Image: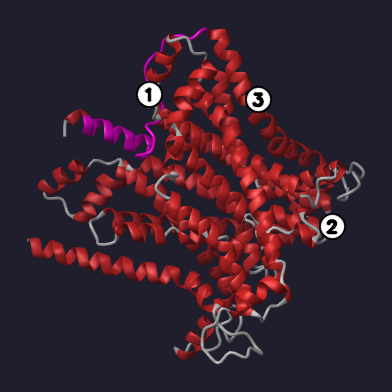
Amino acid sequence: MQEAELRGRWWRFLLILIITAVVLVPIAAIFLLSLQPSLGSTTTSQYTFENFTNIFSQTGVLTWLNNSLLVTVVTVIVSVVVAAPAGYVLSRGRNKLVSGFSLVLFIVQSLPVVTAVIPLFILFAQLGLVDTLLGMMIIYVGATMSVAIWMMAAYYDSIPIALEEAAWIDGASVAGGFVRVVLRNSLPGILSTAVFAFLLSWNDYLVALVFLRSSENYVFPVGLETFFQQNATAWGPVAACAVIMMLPPIIMFAVLNKYFSVGGIGGSLAGR
Amino acid sequence: MSTTSIADRMGRAKRGVGVSGTGRQGGRRRNKSLRAKTWTYIIFTAPALILLLLINLYPVIYAAFQSLRNGTLIDGGDFVGFTNYVNTLVAGNMTPAFWQAALFTLIFTLVGVFGSWAVGLVLALLLRTRIPARGLFKVLLLLPWIVPVVVSAFSWNWLVATPQSPFPMLAQALGLGNVLFLADPTLAKVTVCVFKVWISFPFMMMMMSSALAAVDNNVYEAAKVDGAGSWQVFREITLPLISRSTYISWILMTIFCVNDFPTIFLLTGGGPVGSTTSLVVLAYRTVFQDFQVGPGVAIAFMTTVVLIVVSVVLYRQIRKASIE
């Protein structure tokens, strides 16, 4: 009996090992590709870090990295700051208006970005925000809003309301109770929302494609894609850029993955 | 473990609430001064509401008007009534492209939703059992979802695009002849759909994992004692218990798929001969490559309306079901 169970465990292990290996082929390919010597290289070894040293001098990779980091960090901070109190209302509020707010969030979440991008382009052109990083940040914060509010609300739902009530009895205001009691206990929820906002703004392609024009404003996705289009056969250097681009989200996720959960969204959606 | 705990957990599973949340809390609460509360709530939601109105709702309303005009990106243009809609829907130069894109969007969405759900669920079930290095697999399997789509599209391009790429070479070696993954319309469709499943299954895996985590193990033990086979347990116990989460994940994934621009655009650009052009890709090309803002916005707007109607109907279904 026990032996059968042990054998079953190893079979499952083998199965998941194979699936994981197949799934990771495209990602492993980028790493291997980035280490290949490019045409005209003088090195004789099979693997080299040449591509990495070359791209820093030959491409705008540092500019892209800078711009992307700036846009992403600002987006994450503003998203959390705006979504945290709004999520609180969604979690604790209990009337027709709050239900309406919840429905608005759901509709907003389902709007195609393409539809939003066209009128926003026209609007931002008048405001001088096309081809600026500020314009990108505004759009990204707006784009994260509905899911960020849900994620915060889902986390607040797990904090007993008795905690705030105790603070209220001690004379705290609603806002005071929120900041000192609820927010203080919500670090996992905040980090989860931050991870989501980070991924959205770091990985976005469409908004950057539409709004950015000049190369000094390129964020990573547009920079990488442009570089790829211009050097379709230079796989090595492009792969080196790709490795640099995927490292920040991978590192962040490796550190924070235990806080990140999309499961809460389900509860947040169904419960209201 | 007490019976209340099992009942509670099953209830949570049914409501589609994962381990991370408890859903809405029941019970009445003592009243903080209602007026103070109302004002605080208004101030708390104001910034978010302003952003939502400006970045999300304003563009849709603007798009509705713009779709009735023949403007450009700089000029508002003249009012032309429903010409743009007639041109796309019924009889005009856009009509064949529109319906082709609508059909592909449907295929892409169906494969994307059910493909990624099936893969995600199988992996969630596997990862739920006791196997070595489980935590590591969980993280590694999330990578396709975390890696920027620009990066993964580049990688997939390298793997399949040219005859010298690894996969066509492999096909050649297996005697399948010259397989053109992105040059043949049917194969390009298949490749884009597989790419989408590859990107999306981790999201489903996370949704399903947290749904499964809320199901109490005792339920399975009881079923085993009663002599149920594993397939029977899966069909008659597991699936019904995670049905709410399943519906929610389907709805979310439907929205993600219909709205997905970069996955398609970066891998194939919508080609060959428009075979992988979805509605959002068509809208983008019509506006930003052909500079026909009116028809492009009309396509985007119709997609939006269909999605809103579908999601509101489904959303009400979930709410109704979760109240019962």
Q: Is residue B166 above or below residue B265?
A: below
Q: In this view, does A20 lie to the left or right of A86?
A: left
A251 or B281, nearer to the observer: A251
The chain ID associated with circle 1 is A
Q: Residue at x 36, y 43 (%)?
A: B243
Residue B300 percent coordinates (x, y)? 71, 49
Q: How many marks?
A: 3
Q: Give the range drawn in magenta.
A: B5-33
As drawn, the label of residue A145 is none
The chain ID associated with circle 2 is B
Q: Look at mark 2 in the image and give the residue it sits on.
A: B291
As drawn, the label of residue A160 is 1
Distance of label 1 from label 3 (alpha carbons): 25 Å
- The image quadrant that residue A74 belongs to is top right
B238 or B46, nearer to the observer: B46
In the structure shown, which secondary structural element does the residue marked by tag 1 occupy? loop
Farthest left residue? A1
The chain ID associated with circle 3 is B
Proximity of marks 1 and 3: CB atoms separated by less than 8 Å: no
* Residue A2 is at least partly visible in this image: yes
